[in-house]
Image (spheres, rainbow, N blue to C red):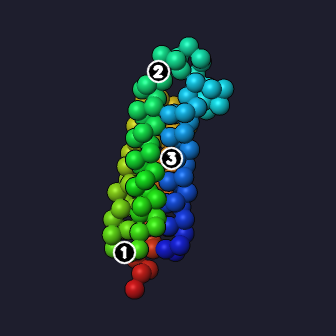
């Protein structure tokens, strides 16, 4: 169970690395337009804001990967709970204010990760 919790946490971390790349480096490309449903004009006007948002996604990614690979189980548990909780809350906010699909891209995986982390902690010796 702990392996599943670590793996899901790491995968969500990698997802946020991908989001960082989209927002910071691919925002004004066809890939960015497709991912976020924007136009070239909108992307040009919002590029600085998107890059800032991408940086925050990078911080989430760093925390998730830190929690996934930390060697101290008690500390890793706390880090995973904190960062998965942050992703879940950010996903709910994004779904409410931007696009409902964010709920399924961010919140659902984070809640699954939280459940696995909590289950793994209950089964730990």
Check disc 1 and report its element: helix, strand or loop: loop
- Residue drawn at x 40%, y 47% is 59
Residue 90, given in percent of the width and then of the height, sits at 40, 42
Residue 104, given in percent of the width and then of the height, sits at 55, 44
Residue 50 to residue 73: above or below:
above
Verify CB contact (< 8 Å) between mark 2 and mark 3. no
In the picture of the structure, the residue carrying the numbered disc 2 is 46
Residue 12 to residue 78: above or below:
above
- Residue drawn at x 44%, y 80% is 123
- Does residue 110 show up? yes
Residue 56, given in percent of the width and then of the height, sits at 40, 41
Check disc 2 and report its element: helix, strand or loop: helix
Mark 2–mark 3 Cα distance, whole angstroms, equals 20 Å
Left or right for 38, reference 65: right
Q: Reading the chain from its start, which is encountered first: label 1 or label 2?
A: 2
In the picture of the structure, the residue carrying the numbered disc 3 is 16
Residue 5 to residue 102: above or below:
below
Mark 1 burial class by Cα count in 10 Å: few <14, some 14-19, many 20+: few
In the picture of the structure, the residue carrying the numbered disc 1 is 72
Mark 2 burial class by Cα count in 10 Å: few <14, some 14-19, many 20+: few
Left or right for 104, reference 30: left
């Amino acid at each position: 169970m702990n392996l599943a919790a670590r793996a899901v946490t790491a995968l969500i971390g990698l997802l946020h690395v991908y989001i960082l790349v989209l927002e910071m480096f691919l925002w004004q490309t066809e890939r960015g337009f497709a991912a976020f449903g924007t136009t070239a004009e909108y992307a040009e006007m919002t590029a600085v804001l998107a890059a800032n948002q991408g940086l925050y996604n990078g911080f989430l990614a760093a925390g998730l990967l830190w929690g996934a690979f930390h060697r101290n189980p008690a500390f890793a548990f706390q880090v995973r709970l904190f960062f998965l909780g942050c992703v879940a809350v950010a996903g709910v906010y994004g779904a409410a204010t931007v696009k409902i699909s964010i709920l399924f891209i961010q919140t659902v995986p984070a809640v699954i990760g939280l459940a696995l982390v909590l289950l793994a902690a209950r089964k730990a010796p």
